Image (spheres, grey):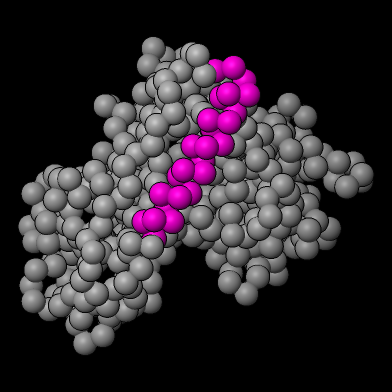
Amino acid sequence: MPSGASPVRTTTTVIIGGGQAGLAMSWCLTKRAIDHVVLERGEVAHTWRTERWDSLRLLTPNWQSRLPGYGYDGDDPDGYRSMPETIEFIDGYARAISAPMETHTNVTSVQRDDGGYMVTTDSGKWRCRTVVLASGACNIARVPALDEAVPAGIARISPIDYRSPDQLDRGGVLVVGASATGTQLADEIQRSGRAVTISVGEHIRAPRLYRGRDLEWWMDAAGVLDERYDEVEDIQRARKLPSLQLAGTTDRATLDLNSLAAIGVKLIGRLAGVHDGKAQFSGSLSNQCALSDLKMGRLLDSIDEWASANGLDGEVEAPHRLAPTKVEESPPLGMDLGNGEIKTIVWATGYRPDHSWLDVPVFDRKGQIRHDGGIVSEAPGMYLLGIQFLRRRKSALIDGCGDDARDLSAHLAAYLDGAA
């Protein structure tokens, strides 16, 4: 070993990521007496601390923040946590389970090593038999390539860097993307006095409350969120679906395109291109909204069927439906970005994980890790955790980490015993 070099430390499992997913796996491994370490690039819940806007609240009710051996114990189970409250919840979990954390430790490489893996960090190396990739699904904003064609005078920002309307120019704002993030930001920015136009593509409309109860309560009770990855017809399609248009607000209001239009937000079709300073939009706005309304109706139909089958019709409000989404008969198909009206574009076009440090050939042609419900079959002893619809529809929620971690820790233990 070169003079001054740090010795290589050893452990059975290295967990990369100290958010809710990594901590849930830590709890499961501790229960199985499997030696491990959790490596976190910043503090516990780093992403929640540094990459979320100021006013954001969880879109799931407080009671739904359930992690292995830990849950909500406050007096507002139907409320929605603010970011400081979310950080404290996850930080409290790390303390409660005495997770073996190495914070401020940035992973720079993961490589195969003599039947296991070598994990290199900026503070030394770890040799392990198994590794869990729990660094999150929302590390990098998905900014479309057409961003490069936007005129230089227009500021562009992603939700990772956005904190509040105060950092934006006082002029008009184009929000691209109308799932949960896009609709929440459009609502906040419009209420700040800036004129907002929202570019709408595929989205999933949903009521915050249905028949007197939170929509998340219905999906939890009816088993919608527990649907497994091996039970759906097209899991790749399911993993790409946008998040529900839900927001966690103190008044538990529904946030959809109708509510945005009611406060003055202008609706326009999907952004299709930018050429010579002019933006082109798809003419499918009406169809996209009709399809979204249809999907919402199907979800509510399934809830109604479950309520009837389980004898709840007499205990809850009667079924109802939201009014159809209202759109212009002929919305504009173009916008001159050079006329000075639009000063900022917000790219609410999704996120992707950052696995640039993973030096093991397990990626598909789109740069995604190939896996079977979190089991990376091409790299025995490697597991993925905390991404959209990993093993269950709720996998990306705080509430989904525990069940996925239990499943994968069982497989990990069997692998160590030579039975998997």
**Pick the front one: 255 or 384:** 255
- Residue furthest right as drawn: 419
**Pick the front one: 399 or 289:** 289
Queried whether the magenta region covers residue 416, the answer comes back as: no
Kindly identify the residue that appears in the image at 19 percent across and 82 percent down: 277
Left or right: residue 311 compared with residue 289:
right
Place of residue 325 in the rendered image (x, y in percent of width and height, measured from the top left): 31, 50
Kindly identify the residue that appears in the image at 63 percent across and 48 percent down: 390
Q: How many marks?
A: 0
What is the quadrant of the N terminus in the image?
bottom right
Asked whether residue 32 is in view, the answer is yes
Left or right: residue 29 compared with residue 319:
right
Residue 317 in the image: above or below residue 202: above
**Pick the front one: 390 or 302:** 302
Place of residue 376 in the rendered image (x, y in percent of width and height, measured from the top left): 73, 56
Place of residue 68 in the rendered image (x, y in percent of width and height, measured from the top left): 62, 26
- Residue furthest bottom as drawn: 276
Kindly identify the residue that appears in the image at 39 percent across and 60 percent down: 288
Residue 61 found in image quarter: top left
Magenta range: 288-312
What is the magenta segment's predominant secondary structure? helix
Asked whether residue 90 is in view, the answer is no
Kindly identify the residue that appears in the image at 38 percent across and 72 percent down: 144
Place of residue 306 in the rendered image (x, y in percent of width and height, measured from the top left): 59, 28
